Image (cartoon, grey):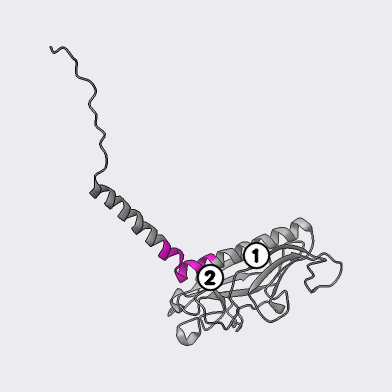
Amino acid sequence: MGRYGKGPRRCGRGMTLVELMVVVGLIAFLMTVMAVRTHSASYRLKSAVSQLRSLVQRARLEAVKHNKNVYLDFDAEDDNVLDTVVLWVFGGSGGSSPSYDPGRDLTIVAEKIFSPPGTRTNKPTLGAVPASQGGPATGAPRDGGTIPEDGVSFSGNRINLNPDGTSSAGSVYVHVPKDPKAGTYAVVINNAGRAYLRYFPTGGTAWEDR
């Protein structure tokens, strides 16, 4: 036996230049894939619709919580531009369809989600892919109906949630004008105040539940 015993073998070794380049390349590839996905029309469309549905659900909860009428307004400034969604609690008394007053009412959310209708943009916009381009010819609710030009079928472009959680019924349509292949989404709200999603694939024949 030798004078010195065998010590532990050193298994570790540094990365070679080739291995390092492979790792860096993989990271760059994954980042590119994620960037393409998060900037794709389909991804942004789904994100906008999900945000809108969450606002409707929150509006219903706020109405019950405050025991007051709560409104989700697409034209709170009454300027015929439907781009900023305002979720607010009516702070006054009486009046079934009051005007939004930031000084009187409790503003819960006020944010831009959609581009104004009629603009040529690659962002999610209120409205539907035209039927001439393979979009829906009938409304998203299960009983059909028509699709409004501005994409919001609610009277006054406003969803009214009552203190008991019930609501005015209607639909909100969203699409990406410069990318009709992304299809059309609709958030449909029934009189019980519940929201469900429907999707119409461009070139398809019927609305699909999502």
Q: Element under label 1?
A: helix
Q: Where in the figure is residue 119, as x and y percent of width and height?
A: 56, 82
- Residue at 46 percent across and 79 percent down: it is 180
Q: Element under label 2?
A: strand
Q: Where in the figure is residue 68, as x and y percent of width and height?
A: 79, 62
| Magenta residue check for 36 | yes
Could you tell me if residue 159 is visible in this image?
Answer: yes
Could you tell me if residue 141 is visible in this image?
Answer: no
Q: Where in the figure is residue 204, as x and y percent of width and height?
A: 44, 78
Residue that numbered label 1 is attached to: 56
Q: Residue furthest left?
A: 1
Other residues around mark 2 within 10 Å, as few (<14) / some (14–19) / many (≥20): some
Location of residue 5 with respect to 9 vertically, above or below: above
Magenta stretch?
35-47
**Which of pointers 1 and 2 lies earlier in the amino acid sequence?**
1
Location of residue 157 with respect to 91 vertically, above or below: below
How far apart, in angstroms, are the residues tagged by discs 1 and 2? Answer: 15 Å
Residue that numbered label 2 is attached to: 198
- Residue at 19 percent across and 15 percent down: it is 5
Q: Quadrant of the N terminus?
A: top left
Other residues around mark 1 within 10 Å, as few (<14) / some (14–19) / many (≥20): many
Instruction: Report the side of 62 relative to 34 (left or right).
Output: right
Which amino acid is tagged 2? Arg
Which amino acid is tagged 1? Val
Location of residue 181 with respect to 31 vertically, above or below: below
| Magenta residue check for 8 | no
Res. 193 mark: none
